Amino acid sequence: MTDFWRNKRVLVTGGAGFIGSHLVERLIDEGASVTVLDPLFIGLGGKEEHLSHLPKVRWLRFDMAHDSALSQALQGCELVFNLAGNVSHEDSMRMPSFDLAANYSSHLYLLEGIRRWAPQARVVYSSTRQVYGAPQTLPVSETHPLGPMDVNGIHKLACEQLHLLYHRVHEIRSVVLRLTNTFGPRMLIEHGRQGFIGWFLNRALLGEKIELFGGGKQRRDFTYVSDAVDALMLAGAQQNYWGEIFNLGGSVASLRDVAVLLKELAPNSRFVDVDFPEERKKIDVGDYFADSGKIEKALGWKSSVSLREGLSQSLDYFRTNSRLYLGRDL
Ligand SMILES: NC(=O)c1ccc[n+]([C@@H]2O[C@H](COP(=O)([O-])OP(=O)(O)OC[C@H]3O[C@@H](n4cnc5c(N)ncnc54)[C@H](O)[C@@H]3O)[C@@H](O)[C@H]2O)c1
């Protein structure tokens, strides 16, 4: 793949965030010329330090809805990884207008910008398993009925449809990946609103109790961040699948399994069973795991990092960088 990326002019929206910064790092390694659009919205996973070791990156600290920053970012751009967004389902219910801007309307500006200033660019959009809602059958394939259960899922679904519409009507070469629970170094662990795995890592590192809602029986599908980056890179470099949607998967485990693994890997870690809080229960999708056969067959992607290995690498990273993520040395 190396030749494909050498000197490619690539824009990564949300590039200072968790997944975005790993992708940027990989792109730089492969010789791409990378621009990031990311204003570091407060409360999301972006950090200055995620990119400060990469002096070659051109970082425009703007919302992608900012017209002149967007036109600058798209000048000569050959490929856009659109990773900007708000990940928190809970926050989307408390602040739906913010979620609308982060997960829908700013993307409309981006796609209009691409149509105007970079119609030749390829576009890879990071959507979410949340668009399916509570699975009716498992594993969930791309043809499973859609039924998002929260504001975040509705906006992400509308946004992926927008990407596909711009492909059908305006011939923009876009492709959609539906990510599942992605984890690894640099993920947001300061609060629990971006997903339970970051919060479990926080509790394990600080030796605080992990609370398992309803006993933690729900099963989920976990993708280590380097595997997610592999999939994004493959989706950007392919020729034949514009206008398509691909699921990602990884390791299937219950929340309880994750807590047990963390106890093994971080000896101070503890967990307790608690009742499901009412407001969480209403938007919980229950068991989810993906059928990722389509991307395996089409693009040759397969996850390679196990849950145990990924958790171990994450704990090592956060122990070394605890001041940045937890505000104190461990
Ligand atoms: N992390 C996961 O488990 C997961 C699962 C499914 C889908 N996704 C999707 O992957 C993408 C990246 O997630 P992440 O975990 O890296 O999130 P993150 O919070 O770490 O990073 C998101 C970044 O996007 C930036 N951003 C938000 N709105 C923006 C805008 N209008 N213009 C420019 N930048 C903007 C934020 O400042 C932040 O730095 C998101 O689209 C998310 O919906 C993530």
Image (cartoon, helix red, strand yellow):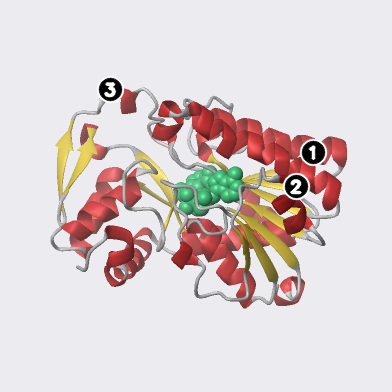
Residue tagged by mark 3? 278
Indicate the secondary structure of the residue bearing disc 1.
Answer: helix
Quote the CA–CA distance across marks 1 and 3.
39 Å
Rendered view: 146 above or below 47: above
When asked about the image quadrant of residue 101, the answer is top right
The residue carrying pointer 2 sits among few (fewer than 14), some (14 to 19) or many (20 or more) residues within 10 Å by Cα, namely many
**Quarter of the image that includes the C terminus:** bottom left
Q: Residue at x 85, y 54 (%)?
A: 120
Image location (x, y in percent) of residue 263 = 18, 57
Residue tagged by mark 1? 166
Q: Is residue 243 visible?
A: no
Quote the CA–CA distance across marks 2 and 1.
8 Å
- Left or right for 328, reference 12: left
Of residues 174 and 119, the one drawn nearer to the viewer in this rendering: 119
The residue carrying pointer 3 sits among few (fewer than 14), some (14 to 19) or many (20 or more) residues within 10 Å by Cα, namely few
Q: Residue at x 59, y 26 (%)?
A: 145
Q: Earlier in the sequence, mark 1 or mark 3?
A: 1
Quote the CA–CA distance across marks 3 and 2.
38 Å
Amino acid type assigned to the residue bearing label 1 in the image: Tyr
Q: Earlier in the sequence, mark 3 or mark 2?
A: 2
Rendered view: 135 above or below 53: above
Residue tagged by mark 2? 174
What numbered label is drawn on residue 275?
none
